[in-house]
Image: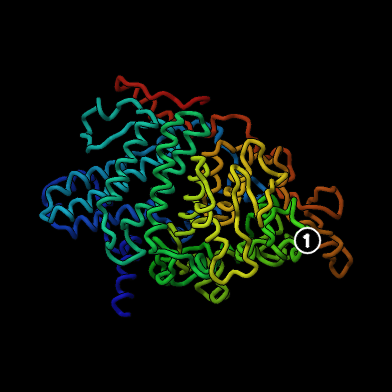
Amino acid sequence: MIRKISIYIFFILLFTGCKKDFLERDPLDELTNNDYWSSENNVRTFSYGFYERYFRGYGRGNTWGDYFSGESLNDDFANSAPAQFVQIVPSSAADAAWTFEWVRRANVMLAGIPQVPMEEEAKNHWIGVARFFRALEYHRLVSRFGDMPWFDQVIDDQDTELLYKKRDARQFVTDKMLADFQFAAEHVRLQNGEKGLTVNKDVVLAFMSRVFLFEGTWLKYHEIDQEKAKTYLEAAKWAANELILSGRYTLGPDYRSLFNSLDLSTNPEMILYRKYAIGILTHALHSNNNKEPQAGISKNALENYLCTDGLPITLSKVYKGDKSIDNVLIDRDPRMLGTIVPELRLQGIATNYSTSGYSVHKFLNESIKDLPEGNLSGNPTDAPIIRYGEVLVNYAEACAELGTINQEDLDKSINVLRKRGNLTNKLPDLQVSGSSAMVNNVVYSDPAKDSEISSILWEIRRERRAELMMEGFRLNDLRRWKKLSYADTRNNVSINRGAWINKNDYLDSNGKSRVANLVLDGGGDVGYIIPAFRAESQRVFDNDRVYLWPLPIDQITLYRENGSELKQNPGW
């Protein structure tokens, strides 16, 4: 036990900067000399410098991580001031997050490894780790900007021809990413330090399923390259299936404990997680999820959850309506209870109110909520980085997008999720017949379904949204499906609606409503809360250009000044 605690503290110190991080020394070229690349331990330490960038978890201090409001521009949040699509071309690379620093660091690592006196197996392992991180950074860049210049070597600062090379096609770069992932999947060790805390083969496979599901569906729905889309979807399916067949992971018995635990080390669902500890590394998500006013979950997001008969609210006979929070939550997908507070928190009554009245407690640990560590930025709950539940929905979606989905695929993915551990009122199995969804051997189609999507794909996307609710995926899901129109608050009214209330149910001692300032869609005292009620605060999707970010003006200028061209993204 003492050894285990010391290992945890070691990793926490390493990723907080409490231990001096040589990666912060400038210039980075100091690490290209032979003095540093002298031992495997030095290579290992160099690799830890990437963790803070790609494995943010719940963030640190008051800085947000990937969860709860990492990307509030979507249809899950009903905010009083909705996040807006990008409208202005950034003036600088910093404003646009246009940087090749982390590509360079990965290439520095790749250049240094051959110099280290260690066995070929060890060299291939660390080369795999470096290529894994390079692929992750290129995934970020390609997802954000589209076509990108590919660099697979350390570029000299004076080599302007290479520094200002033109952008390579998205497919070319993604092929290189795939090669990096394939090498890493073959050579990165299955055991690499403490399980769940460091990059190993399983971490590579899990991220491979995530990255290539994104890239495959992007190419498919943006109509760029259908053959490459299929290649990438096959890669996503393969990686997820490798983890499924390995038998090394099962689902955690309790859904909510995946997100509010003080110790995830024994949770069988964790492929990679971030360890927190009081006084060493803490975060504020727990407090933001409980003590502060929050952007509420939307009516649209709540309506995504199935009823316990396996049917959507539009078809279910057990749906009780939404005229009370009790009715909203009863006889519904049990993950809903693990996500939503079973009481309304209204502005004018609760200090920790929600803009929609519906609040999220998915990340709240009840045992510490009123203790010092449950307040401000001192929260010590561990954060999942990537987990088996995501791998299962990645697998199902990849199969559906490839057009090969069958009952066996559903039974080892979606239907495993529906049978999670101690969930009560477990959902019946999802069944498939061709492109149709079935439950209890009866074909059904949700009347609220997008007409462009098959019923089985709609249900798999529903499952993904429910399983990964508030985990930072939704915006990128809408982007890759080319469905940012879902996030338009003007045309998709239910994403700008909250709880149904009667203001007369909340009177003070003088007979005045304590929630009088809330605006309801009926215009009177009864109706659904409208969080963003001003016309000028609506989020409008009216231009496909926002699927990609604009390139920064200073970089376009630099390219031109160095005899090259950096062409702006379409529409900008």
Task: Note whether 321 is above or below 81 in the view shown.
Answer: below
Between 495 and 555, which is closer to the camera in this rendering?
495
Locate the N terminus and report the quarter of the image it occupies: bottom left
Q: Residue at x 39, y 56 (%)?
A: 243
- Residue 423 seen anywhere in this rendered image of the structure: yes
The tally of labels here is 1
Q: Extreme bottom residue here?
A: 1
For the residue pair 393 and 48, the one nearer the viewer reads as 393
Looking at the image, which residue is at 60% across and 62% down? 335
Helix, strand or loop status at disc 1: loop
Q: Residue at x 19, y 60 (%)?
A: 41
Q: Quadrant of residue 15?
A: bottom left
Quarter holding residue 212: top left
Residue 267 place in picture, x, y as percent:
44, 69
Crowding at mark 1 (Cα within 10 Å: few <14, some 14-19, many 20+): some
Does 470 sit left or right of 56 as displayed? right
Residue 65 horizontal/vertical position (percent): 47, 55
Q: Is residue 349 above or below residue 144?
A: below
Task: Left or right? Give the position of 307 relative to 173.
Answer: right
Q: Residue lying furthest right in this view?
A: 511
Asked if residue 322 shows in the view, the reply is no
Q: Residue furthest top?
A: 563
Q: Amino acid at mark 1?
A: Lys
Residue 476 screen position, x and y as percent: 51, 43
Q: What colour-coding does the image apply? A: rainbow
The spot of residue 399 in percent (x, y) is: 49, 45
**Is 249 situated above or below 110?**
below
Q: Which residue is mark 1?
A: 320
As displayed, is residue 371 above or below residue 130?
below
